Amino acid sequence: MWNNYLFLIVVIPIIVSIINLVFPKLWKKILTFIGVAITLFLSIKIFAAEALEFSLLDVTLFQTNSLANFILLFINVLSFIILIYSLKNVKEDIENKFFLLFPLAVSFSNGVALSGNMVAFMVFWGLTGMLVYLFGLLSGSKGAESSRKAFIIIGTSDVLLIVGLVIMFLSSQTSDMYSMNVPLSSLLNVIAFICMILSAFTKAGAFPMHTWVPDFAKDAPVESVALLPAAMDKLLGIYLFARIMIDGLFIFPYLVNIIIMVIGVFTIIMAVMMALIQHNGRKLLGYHAVSQVGYMVLGIGTGNPIGIIGGLFHMLNNAIYKSNLFLSFGSVEKKTGTADLDEMGGLARKMPMTFIAALVGALAISGIPPLNGFFSKWMVYQSVLEAAASQTHIWQIVLNVCLVLAVFGSALTLASFIKFIHSIYLSKLPAKYNDVTEVSFANWFGNNLLALMCVIFGLAVYAIPVKLFLLPILPAGSTIKNIMLGFYEPGIILFFFAISIIVGVIIYYIFKKIRFDDEYVGTMPTTEANRITGVEFYDDVKNMRPFKSIYKWANKKYFDIYKYGTDVSLWFGDIFHKLHTGLLHTYAIWTLAGLVIVTLILISAL
Amino acid sequence: MILSQFIFVPLAAAFLIALIARKKENFAAVICMIASLWLFVNSIIAFFRLPEFGGMIMKTTSGWKIPFTIPFVLDNLSAFMLIIISLIGVISAFYALQYIKHFTGKWNFFSLFMLMFTGMNGVVLTGDFFNLYVFMEISLISAYSLVAFGTESEELEAAFKYATMGAITSTMILFGIGILYSFTSTLNMAQVGEIVQQSANKKVIFLVFGLFITGFGLKAALVPFHAWLPDAHPSAPAPISAMLSGVLIKTLGVYTIVRVFFNVFGAPQVVLTILMLLAVLSIVIGGFLSIVQWDFKRMLGFSSVSQIGYVVLGFAIGTPLGILGGVLHLFYHSIFKSLLFLNSGAVEYATGERDIRKLGGLSKDLPITSSTTMVGTLSISGIPPFNGFFSKLIIIIACFQAGNPILGFIAAAVSIVTLAYYLKVQKHAFYGKKKAKQILEKVPFTLKAAMIILAVLCLATSIILIPSIREATVQPIVDTVVNKTQYIDKIIPYLGSI
């Protein structure tokens, strides 16, 4: 038991967390750091090994395959980097609890990735959901409502998972998730399939179960947002989704794929449109966290090899740059004390390292080559093309529309991040931030490690991510050449970028004719009060014809499944409540009526 | 093994308290603690020594023969109930040591508490219908007076309602017993069961079924017989609420239903169907009612209605897996619901307030109450790895396995509702914006200790699910229920031998 890597990688962080209960603060940090470093080491060991197993009491609890290995590795890599960031500047009053929960988050996420047994999977899945709630509560009264909402929606996902797995268990007569395969032949199995998909969507944050992500992102401690909804929950949710779609848990017709792809595209567009108009930086990032899930769903939904690895690669990329963006925004927020984009501006000079990280993240998420986000999106687009090519006319049109919308979504992402970068880092610096300085080393270093990963995974895309992590997931013998449609070489793109920059620099030095000037509004130079923050860049969209009413509906939470759930339960509750008048004779009549009905049923059975 | 100790020890304690401790109130607490500890230890010993006696111990009081005396029967199911009663009893009594100082007439409290204990132990042990009725009344009457213990108008009203409803259904039960007696000429459960099995014309028995389902259903607070509970349970002092919701409704309601319908009447399908119906109604209506409550304890009361529905649903499915789920949920619910009632008591003790809208930000002021409430919340909502997750999971699997997917969906869906209303408490009372109300008093030691013990149990009792432990502990209980009328077959030879 104690020499099994799979067991250790789950148990060590738990032990760390238990010891942390009694240790003083500094030791907590050191111990957590050591613990997570060990799990990182173990995850590399596991990744390098062939399929491993861990059994307890004659039940195979943990199992690995190439997909699980891949997810496991990046759970630990990302949590290690986020931990580096969190070593400094976690809010003083929550630090103690934060370092209790952090190792648990690592352990439970590892547990989900490794679980082959269905009960173990449910347990770890539920535990990771519980951590979202506990992390959210660290913000105290500020996070109380959003973490409740998050936990209720995530709790729903747990229940859906339970129902799905129970039906699958009874249908396939095995509790081993690696050997389940359920045909969608009966209504019950179809329900199980829908439950499982929705459960995965909830965790990852795809439509229609996404609404907890932006709210949670707004209120919870930023380190935990970067860790859970931005990184772990994406990895785990998409992991389950991928298991459903490609590991043969179910057997289903291609129409299901198309429906899922449409949901994916809808998620992309809907969330990015919401992100465009946000004034709160965290909420903006939260909506992008939802929007990006759409690409993963779209890619994996195609079911073809390029789409699967494209979707998984996008999941990985998104986890990297989204936690990067959250952390960089967290640094800014710590220094300025606000998450409101209207209040910020011109921080690039004050916080250069954070700016670099944020810029790389923003470019990567917008899909600018040669960064990693471009390549994964590119793979997803190709997979949609390929899927469309194999379909009949009507579906071809649908899929091509999907493709166009997905590309359009990427453009909107870029637009949204131009606003994001401009309003935080580039516009005029408000006087109150004159004393702002760069965050501490641990913060910007951790942050830039993530940025560096974006660059490396973009430039060395064939040599590192594709070769090491993605191809092993596909059946043996697959090469990137025979699944890719076009030609793409990040080196060449980098070369062109470099050339254009060099040419620009040369032109600059030759002519040196640059006019520095103030911003003007009307004919007057802008003042601090009416400076251009950039937040209003897309306010016109809000007033455009179809969007105006859609945004209005969104503000009224018409697209929020949580609102409907609450309304329906309260409605039922009120009805039943009104029946309870508190009058004794009413209750006595109920009892007698109950007796009569029960007796009637009994007599009818005679 | 002296079976009658489970009855005479608490009974003697009750009278001893009334006699001696009137003058010295501290004696009352000491006697009560000693008696409940004694019962706890002995119930555990009894449970684990049962296999030595072939899974069943039978004793008659005095040396007389059957129609003139009462048999006590201890099998796995009753031993299991004894453990639950005395476990929650000892913890509640310990909690009450300091909690009760807000009330006058401490000794009354402990005396009634012991009397309630006596009644419940009697119900669990007896092998005789009329005796069952008597013990049930003993515990109910002490419960009525304990509900009214605070003597505020609201509490008196609740106790009155409880007493009236209780009396109506006790009459039904008594009437049912009367019919049985006229039909079989005996009150002994095993003999009744045997005669009913052999008789050709069973029509009259169905009337008895109806009366019993209504009667015991009200004690168990199944919808539509539940209306007294949300008034009665919140009105009692917190340790009593914990006993009522944690144990009393299970002993007088669920246990009797299981014993009478499974072991005596052999679980006829129509009864199971009716129970299933009532259980689902309870789950759904109790769940939705809880979500609109603002009074912490009242919400817990409605939640008990919903959760008892899960327990009965498990039994009503009737498959071994369903019964396992029912047994486990019965045990687990007694732990986490008692914990939550004790939590609500601690909050009320510290702030004098039960309305969660008027509370807020308590997580900082009452860290232990807050964290143990969190454990209770997570357990009852079925979040792994807390015990409630496993019992609910088993019940859900059992529903699907028995070919009742709709029941499974309902059971699963209401657990989201459960999560929602407990998170409402968390949000408003413990993590919401701090309200002006100040902490009036610190939560004293025994309250904290009791809550911590139960919170630990919420997690620790999950290990029952490990196959080898399950085989040794829960499986015999499940077998007792699954094997239905084997209970009769075991007792009849004994009755003949004396």
Image (spheres, coloured by chain):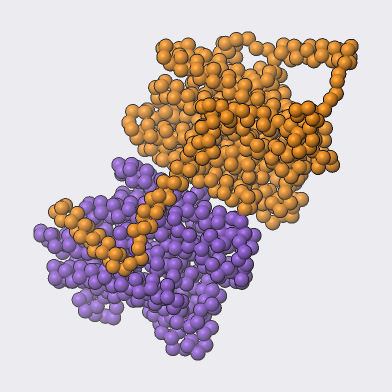
* Between B255 and A603, the one nearer to me in the picture: A603
Q: Is residue A274 above or below residue B111?
A: above
Query: Can the viewer see residue B275?
Result: yes
Percent position of residue B256, x then y: 30, 64
* Between B184 and A134, the one nearer to me in the picture: A134
Percent position of residue B119, x then y: 35, 74
A176 with respect to A417 (left or right): left
Q: Is residue B19 above or below residue B469?
A: below
Residue extending furthest front?
Answer: A523
Which lettered chain is shown in purple?
B
Q: Quadrant of the N terminus of chain A?
A: top right
* Between B180 and B416, the one nearer to me in the picture: B416
Dividing the picture into quadrants, the one containing residue B147 is: bottom left
Percent position of residue A168, x then y: 40, 35
Residue at 21% of width from left, 79% of height from top? B68
Residue at 28% of width from left, 52% of height from top? B277
In the figure, what tint was chain A given? orange
B259 with respect to A38 (left or right): left
